[in-house]
Every structure is written in structure tokens, then in C-alpha cells.
Amino acid sequence: MKENNSLPLIMMHDVEYVYSNGTVALKKVSLNINKGEFVAIMGQNGAGKTTLIRTFNGLIRPTKGEVFLEGENIDSKTIATLSKKVGIIFQNPTHQLFSNTVEDEIKFSLKNLNLDREEIQIKVDKVLEEFNLEKYRKRSPLSLSGGESKKIAIASIICRDPEILVFDEPTLGQDAKEIRFLVKLIHNELKKGKTIIMVTHSVEFTIENSPRTVLMSGGRIIADGPTKNILTNEFLVEKSSLIMPQIYQLRIELQKIGIDVPKEVVKEQEMINFLNNYLENKTITIPEERL
Ligand SMILES: Nc1ncnc2c1ncn2[C@@H]1O[C@H](COP(=O)(O)OP(=O)(O)O)[C@@H](O)[C@H]1O
Ligand SMILES: [Mg+2]
């Protein structure tokens, strides 16, 4: 596919999708995503998030409307071609893993990229090291823990070096260390100019990491904009069955004792800095009527 830098990397225009049982999963969805963006897709279960991201590599073909990748309509392109550009890491890694060993899983993923055996081996070794999976090389992917098999699913996509990485709920069931690994990996890929799209329910993850949020409900995009504006809006958060980020809840508590936190303070570190500064030269006087 040829480069077209003046257009958004992904363009969806009035996309509708109806499953064979009649469920309307996407209704007139239009969305543009630029190269290098990190976009979070949020919304309650059944909102259409997974259906939407599956249109990006042709796994789901719109019933109506079009999807463009680098300015080209993808309707005539095969999943195999599209998968070289768009790597999707599915919600349940066991649906994605099927080889006998971790090493074979990565090797399989590198097939059809026109690489010779030696190049494949180099890539396999590199990704196993990067992901600290060397010790599992000969193990069956399905014999590993949920967190580890998720890591293998991610490794098997990353090794193909796709332009666009799409994660479907990668933070689900991950512990703090696994989430830190994911954050590092995402920021690394963004530095290389990659585009990241992430379906997640984690408001804390989104507010800390993703500048833009797309909110879905009932097969539609109900809001699209800066994360700090969307996830601090009570109406939108409520409508999507999300929980307000803790920082925002803290802001409300602080307001009750007379501390007005500036609007631009949304991340944990920004709040810590603000409070440290504030307490350095002020005493909190608790007004009776505000408690
Ligand atoms: N294979 C399927 N067949 C029929 N309906 C489906 C299928 N997959 C999802 N749906 C329905 O489509 C709607 C959107 O689902 P989905 O895209 O999975 O939402 P989300 O990822 O936001 O939870 C839901 O009503 C869901 O029940
Ligand atoms: Mg889903």
C-alpha cells in the first residue's frame, strides 16, 4: 500500500454492521485516527468496541459504509494483507494461540512475511528476549498463566512490526507488574511512530496514558475527544457505566476543604506535585459550611 501522509491513517465512514442473527452492532460509525496517535476506546459491554476494531483488518466487513487505511478502501484487501499493517491482540489470548511451543507460536506468526529461516530465527530470539519469555521457549503457550499467555499473544503480534497495534482489553486481569510492562511497551512503540488503539475499561490506565478517548454506547460513538475532558464528565462517565478516575474523585474531596485543584491536573504525578506545592506554603483551613 502506498503512503499518503495528508490523510488520516484510518478513516471509517458511516460504518454499520449487523451480525447474522440480526444484532446491529455498529450504527453509522465515523472515526478518523492519525498516524502516531494513542486512542482509547471505552464503553460498556456490548457497546460495539470489539466489532469496531475487527473492521480494521477485515475480520469484519461493514454491512454498510467504508473503512480506509492509508487512504485506500480496504474492502478488496485480504485479511492477510491487512494484518501486515494492523496487528490485533485479542481479548482472550487462548483464541489466538494454538502452536505446540511458544517458539513455534512466534515462528508461525512470522510466516508469509517473506523472511528466510535465519531472519525468522533472529526475530524469534529478539522478541523472546525483549518479552523475557526465553525460559518458556519450549513450553506450550496454553500451559502458562493468563498473564504469560497474554504476553505471548502480544509478542507474536509485535514481532511482525505492524504499523497499527490494536489491543482488546489488555489490562483485564493483569497485575501491576504486567500493566507496567504494557505501558512501557506501548510508549516504546509510540516513540517508533506506531499508532495504538486500545479497548479498555480501565479509566485509570486511560487517564494516565491515552490523550484521546472514543466513547461508545449502543453501537455508536457518543463522544470523542481529549481523555481529560471525557473521563471527568459526569454525564458521559455515567452513561458508559464507567467509574470516575480516582484523581477526579479526590479533586471533589479537596474542593470540600477549600482546595481548588486546577483543571489541567489529571494525572497522579501532577496531583502529587500540585499538593506538595500547595502544602509548602499554605495551611488548610477547613471551613465549617463546606463539610
Ligand atoms: N458473533 C456475534 N454474533 C451475534 N452478535 C454478536 C456477536 N458478537 C457480538 N455480538 C453482539 O454485538 C454487540 C456488540 O458486541 P461487541 O462488539 O462484542 O461489544 P463490546 O466489545 O463493546 O463488548 C453486542 O450486542 C453483542 O452481543
Ligand atoms: Mg469486547
Image (spheres, rainbow, N blue to C red):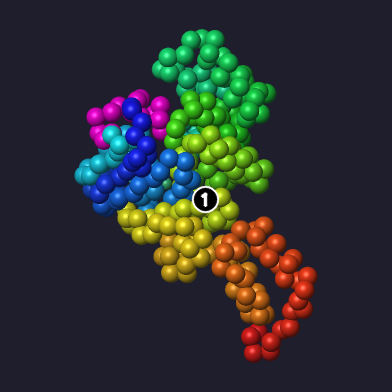
Residue at 47%, 14% (x, y): give it: 115
Residue 83 magenta: yes
Could you tell me which quadrant the N terminus lies in?
Answer: top left
Res 3 quadrant in image: top left
Instruction: Respond yes or no on whether mark 1 lies under 8 Å from ligand 1.
Output: no
Q: Which of the two residues, 18 or 6, is positioned nearer the viewer here? A: 6
Q: On the rendered structure, is 201 left or right of 80?
A: right
Residue 101 seen: no
Residue 242 magenta: no
Could you tell me which quadrant the C terminus lies in?
Answer: bottom right
Residue 162 seen: yes
Where is mark 1, residue-wise? 210
Residue 202 coordinates in the image, percent (x, y): 54, 53
For the residue carrying disc 1, how many other residues have a C-alpha within 10 Å: few (<14), some (14-19), or many (20+)?
many
Mark 1 element type: loop
Residue 7 to residue 228: above or below:
above
Residue at the bottom extreme of this rendering: 289
Residue 230 coordinates in the image, percent (x, y): 46, 62
Residue 288 coordinates in the image, percent (x, y): 68, 89
Q: Amino acid at mark 1?
A: Ser
Q: Which of the two residues, 130 or 60, is positioned nearer the viewer here? A: 130
Residue 143 to residue 261: above or below:
above
Residue at 32%, 43% (x, y): give it: 11
Chain part drawn in magenta = 73-88
Residue at the left extreme of this rendering: 64
Residue at 48%, 25% (x, y): give it: 160
Residue at 53%, 64% (x, y): give it: 244
Residue 287 to residue 232: above or below:
below
Residue at the top extreme of this rendering: 117
